[in-house]
């Protein structure tokens, strides 16, 4: 009987990706198989997120619950990775000495060795260093499930937005060589993957550093990925308005494989707040990019992240944000109440918007965003769209789910499992808040 691994993942898609890679690595190195409950595991890993408040406390609460499992089974090993680990390092093992290993987002490839060392020494090990490109070079080829796969193209972020902890926990931007990415894409295509989602904290600062391509960026990479046989859909996340150049707009006209949706976080609609956030672009510049994108690709969906209650946000600033939402007409987006983060420059600003006010503003914004996304869905009713069938519906196993050309989830009745992983034409018949209903077109 092989050893059992349980991984709990908090936070972003990068963390999801890293967790999958850790599973692959530990399977190769020690034959671990992944299980779905902590109770049956021989090794538990917690992949943490520190983007917003109370992250550290959540981690220690979770560890407290697992401590009891370890008391029952002293052979159990526990590891903590991700951004809280990167931020706290040895503070984790001093506060929770039963933790066997601590590693950062840049050292996940060393997890098998850390596991080995802590088992042999019988003591905890901590490695939260940022060893340049070593991570990319030491990860196994991903095992893929389903027709859609993430491919990591860069790590870290140099933007240092004043509110954000990411540059501090994930380190500086490092791009992966284009040849390695393309090799991985081709491998995935051979395993019937049809859709590639290029992944990084800040993908539009991607640069291939080889002489041959002289520092070509994301647009060039997209072109190369589209040329890979079998890849019919491409998406990327997350990008930053500051580096969304004309080449990235033009590529939407050139490459039909690019999906008709862009996640382009704006955070606020107020120039004053954008400046205080150090976002390096104005409201006007953002609207300009959106205008160009909608022109390049009619029917383009735009989604965003918003932060509410940043220090100094007045009613007028908030109204500017609401007004921007009206102008753009966003699709399903994310919004959060500002939370001061360690090491960031904004943490020293006076957090002067009362919590009650922040909550009211957040509710108002979220209602507006929901309505905005719903009206996009309603406009789609009656349209026939080319969809990628991703699997059986999560809610009703008698139905299938697929994703439309603008990446909306669509549920439809079907009994042919051979359609999973393939493209079909579906007519949109109903718009719901989080999904569409459709009918297969023969
Ligand atoms: N790389 C991405 C986003 C990284 S974090 C970008 O360029 O925007 C994901 C989202 O979390 C951010 O877009 C922001 O909306 C939110 N976020 C980050 N730090 C935050 C903080 N201190 N308080 C509240 N929300 C935050
Ligand atoms: Fe964070 Fe800004 Fe980078 S939001 S991830 S510092 S672009």
Image (tube, rainbow, N blue to C red):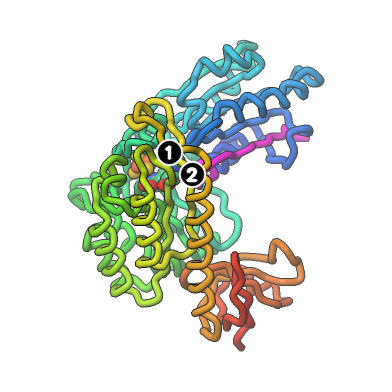
**Is 11 inside the magenta-drawn segment?**
yes
Judge: label 1 CB < 8 Å from ligand 1.
no
Residue 154 in view: no
In front of the other: 216 or 67: 67
Quarter in which the N terminus is drawn: top right
Spatial distance from mark 2 to mark 1, Cα to Cα? Answer: 7 Å
Asked if the residues shown at circle 2 and circle 1 are in contact, with their CB atoms under 8 angstroms apart, the answer is yes
**Number of numbered labels in the structure image:** 2
- The structure residue drawn at horizontal position 48% and vertical position 39%, both measured from the top left corner, is 139
Compared to 171, does 89 lie above or below?
Answer: above
In front of the other: 119 or 348: 348
Mark 2, secondary structure of its residue: helix
| Residue extending farthest bottom | 442
- Left or right? Give the position of 71 relative to 53: right
Q: Percent from the top left, x then y, of residue 184? A: 44, 52
- The structure residue drawn at horizontal position 48% and vertical position 28%, both measured from the top left corner, is 104
Q: Percent from the top left, x then y, of residue 134? A: 39, 32
**Is 244 inside the magenta-drawn segment?**
no
In front of the other: 167 or 303: 303
Q: What residue is shown with label 2?
A: 357
Crowdedness near tag 1: few (<14), some (14–19) or many (≥20) residues, C-alpha within 10 Å: some
Mark on residue 281? none
Residue 376 in view: yes
Judge: label 2 CB < 8 Å from ligand 1.
no
Q: What residue is shown with label 1?
A: 353
Magenta-drawn segment: 1-16
Q: In the picture, residue 258 is in which quadrant? A: bottom left
């Amino acid at each position: 009987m092989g050893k059992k691994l349980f991984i709990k993942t908090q936070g972003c898609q990068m963390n999801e990706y890293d967790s999958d890679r850790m599973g692959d690595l530990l399977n190769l190195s020690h034959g671990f198989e992944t299980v779905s409950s902590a109770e049956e595991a021989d090794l538990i890993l917690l992949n943490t997120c520190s983007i917003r408040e109370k992250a550290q406390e959540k981690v220690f609460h979770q560890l407290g619950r697992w401590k009891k499992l370890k008391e029952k089974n002293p052979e159990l090993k526990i590891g903590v990775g991700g951004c809280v680990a990167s931020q706290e390092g040895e503070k984790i093992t001093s506060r929770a000495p039963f933790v066997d290993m601590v590693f950062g987002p840049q050292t996940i490839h060393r997890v098998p060795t850390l596991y080995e060392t802590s088992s042999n020494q019988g003591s905890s090990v901590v490695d939260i260093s940022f060893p340049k490109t070593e991570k990319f070079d030491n990860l196994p080829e991903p095992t893929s499930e389903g027709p859609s796969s993430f491919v990591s193209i860069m790590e870290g972020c140099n933007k240092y937005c004043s509110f954000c902890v990411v540059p501090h926990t994930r380190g500086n931007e490092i791009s992966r060589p284009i040849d390695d990415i393309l090799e991985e894409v081709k491998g995935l295509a051979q395993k019937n993957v049809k859709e590639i989602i290029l992944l990084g904290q800040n993908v539009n600062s991607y640069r291939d550093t080889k002489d041959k391509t002289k520092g070509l960026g994301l647009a060039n990479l997209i072109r190369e990925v589209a040329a890979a046989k079998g890849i019919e859909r491409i998406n990327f996340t997350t990008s930053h308005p500051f580096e969304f150049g004309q080449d990235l707009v033009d590529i939407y006209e050139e490459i039909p494989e690019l999906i008709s949706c862009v996640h382009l976080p704006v955070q606020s609609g107020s120039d004053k707040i954008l400046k205080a956030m150090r976002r390096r672009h104005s409201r006007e510049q953002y609207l300009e990019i959106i205008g160009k994108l909608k022109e390049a690709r009619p029917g383009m969906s735009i989604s965003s992240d918003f932060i509410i209650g940043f220090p100094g946000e007045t009613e007028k600033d908030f109204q500017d944000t609401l007004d921007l939402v009206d102008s753009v007409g966003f699709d399903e987006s994310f919004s959060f109440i500002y939370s001061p983060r360690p090491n960031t420059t904004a943490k020293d600003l006076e957090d002067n918007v009362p919590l009650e006010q922040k909550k009211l503003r957040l509710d108002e914004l979220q209602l507006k965003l929901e309505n905005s996304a719903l009206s996009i869905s309603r406009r789609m009713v009656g349209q026939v769209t080319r969809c990628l069938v991703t699997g059986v519906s999560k809610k009703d196993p008698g139905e299938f789910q697929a994703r439309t050309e603008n990446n909306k989830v669509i549920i439809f009745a079907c009994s042919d499992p051979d359609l999973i992983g393939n493209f079909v034409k579906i007519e949109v018949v109903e718009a719901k808040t989080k999904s569409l209903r459709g009918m297969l077109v023969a």
